[in-house]
Amino acid sequence: MRVAILIPSYNTGRLLKTTVLQALARWKDVWVVVDGSTDGSEKDAEDLQPEHPGLQVVELPVNRGKGSAVLAGAEMLSEAGFTHVLTMDSDGQHPAEFIPKFLSIAEAHPEAALLGQPIFGAEAPLLRVRGRRLSNLWAHIETLGWGIGDSLFGMRLYPLPALLQAFRGTRFARRFDFDTEVAVRLCWNGVPAINVPTPVKYLTAAEGGVSQFRYFRDNTLLTWVHARLLCGFFLRLPLLAWRTLKGGNPAKKVTLTEK
């Protein structure tokens, strides 16, 4: 197993440097994919490279979306010989202190996709918390309950071949739709899924909090995503039903103690 942390970033200001330093404190191989940022934050990450030889900063010339940034990074990591990638957002929401936990589970279950399952604090926007329940319900239906605890949370550890296979199965999943569509397609492809309870923090503006989420735009995109995935679900229903009868997601046997 060779694991790298992959951080896609777009205009997150000073938070990018903080996130990168927190990740480097727990793992040496950290790759940052700057998705056409215009705020100069990539310079903060590049300034860290002389003291951290495992830090790579990749700059994409045009903003193409989170999924495109992850795909670009995943392809480069695969070519560099890495076998797994741990994705985390650059905006400070994901806890770097949970990196060792994800790595420990991956060592025991290298074939599985580890899906962060958010534990929200009191500061989390209620609209966001409640709104994702509908997406989770549709993902549950589209996979016949394979085991996606949360379809939108971005802190995940993927086996790289499985992630790239999921990308090859669609010309979509290149923007905000990435986390949802890739999770569903991993399940369609029979990849074991383990849900990892993970705290999430929504930073205030005073803390430098930045959100690229746009309620109408991104919920419209998610509606389109699930409409497409539902069509794909019906085409795969016989196979999914057969796998469910055979026991479904083998990683459901993993106990909380193992996690």
Image (cartoon, grey):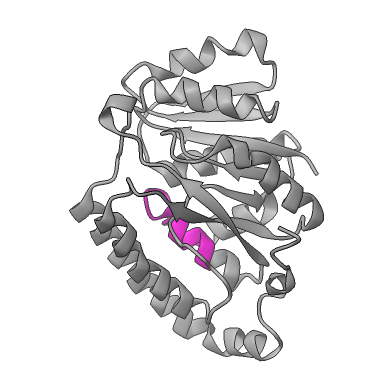
Q: Where 257 falls versus 44 (above or below)?
A: below
Residue 146 belongs to the span the image colors magenta: no
Q: Residue at x 33, y 58 (%)?
A: 129
- Is residue 243 in view from this perspective? yes
Which residue, as the protein is rendered here, is positioned at the far left? 216
Image coords of residue 20 (percent x, y): 54, 25
Residue 21 at x, y percent in the picture: 56, 22
The part of the chain drawn in magenta is: 170-184
Report the side of 31 relative to 216 (left or right). Answer: right
- Tell me: residue 191, above or below residue 145: above
Q: Is residue 255 left or right of residue 134?
A: right
Q: Residue at x 73, y 68 (%)?
A: 254
- The front one of 253 and 48 is 253
- Residue displayed at 61% across by 23% down: 56
Q: Return the x and y of residue 225 as percentages of the image width and height.
A: 35, 65
Judging depth in this view, the residue of 97 and 238 nearest the camera is: 97
Residue 171 seen in render: no
